[in-house]
Amino acid sequence: MGPLTLPLSGLVYLDASGLIYTVERIEPYRTLLEPMWQQAQDGNLTLVSSPVLLVEVLVKPLQDGNTEIEMQYRELFGSNVVRLLDAAYSVFEDAAHLRAETGLKTPDALHAATALQADSTCFVTNDTDFRRVPGLPVVVLDDLLKAESQA
């Protein structure tokens, strides 16, 4: 598996996939993301996301009645390992423009707009649609896995 190269400074933006892979222990992504979580817990890097992340990750555990996974997400948010950034009016305005220009779905447009406004140095995802956003420093997890399998 190719390594996830993280910036030495700045904000690392995480969309829902990275959080879901970690909490729900989905391999090989959980292992790939482990160093990122360790650096965040050690205070060596700052993980950020949009408040829309809360909606995205809690829906399935709530639908399934899986209180164990639901509580793991809530504990993670309570620990401040992932800092949820403000969802100001300007983020929604930018998201509307991104949605119109790139065709991203609303939650993805909100993630992209939030990451861009926060000047994130890295955007960790497994969704290639984010590549359509100019200036967004996207790292697609599957690309790292493919690179390893071709090595």
Image (cartoon, rainbow, N blue to C red):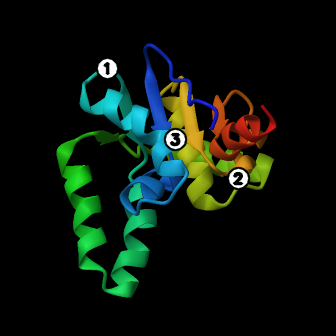
Residues under numbered marks 2 and 3 in contact, where contact means CB atoms less than 8 Å apart: no
> Which part of the image, by quadrant, shows the N terminus?
top right
Residues under numbered marks 1 and 2 in contact, where contact means CB atoms less than 8 Å apart: no
Counting labels gives 3
Identify residue type, mark 2. Answer: Arg
Q: Residue visible at 36% across and 42% down?
A: 86
Pointer 1: residues within 10 angstroms few (<14), some, or many (20+)? Answer: few
Q: Nearer the viewer, residue 111 or 12?
A: 12
135 sits to left or right of 71 = right
In primary-sequence order, the first of circles 2 and 3 is: 3
Q: Return the x and y of residue 116 as percentages of the image width and height.
A: 57, 31
Q: Is residue 54 visible?
A: yes
Residue highlighted by disc 3: 32
Please, is residue 39 above or below residue 61 in the view? above
Identify residue type, mark 3. Answer: Leu
Q: CA gap, disc 1 to disc 3?
A: 17 Å
In primary-sequence order, the first of circles 1 and 3 is: 3
Q: Return the x and y of residue 109 as percentages of the image width and height.
A: 62, 50
Of the residues tagged 1 and 3, which is closer to the observer?
A: 3
Q: CA gap, disc 2 to disc 3?
A: 30 Å
Q: Residue visible at 41% across and 53% down?
A: 22
> Which part of the image, by quadrant, shows the C terminus?
top right
25 sits to left or right of 144 = left
Identify residue type, mark 1. Answer: Asn
Residue highlighted by disc 1: 44
Secondary structure at badge 3 equals: helix
Pointer 3: residues within 10 angstroms few (<14), some, or many (20+)? Answer: many
Residue highlighted by disc 2: 99
Q: Residue visible at 41% across and 75% down?
A: 59
Q: Return the x and y of residue 11 as percentages of the image width and height.
A: 43, 26
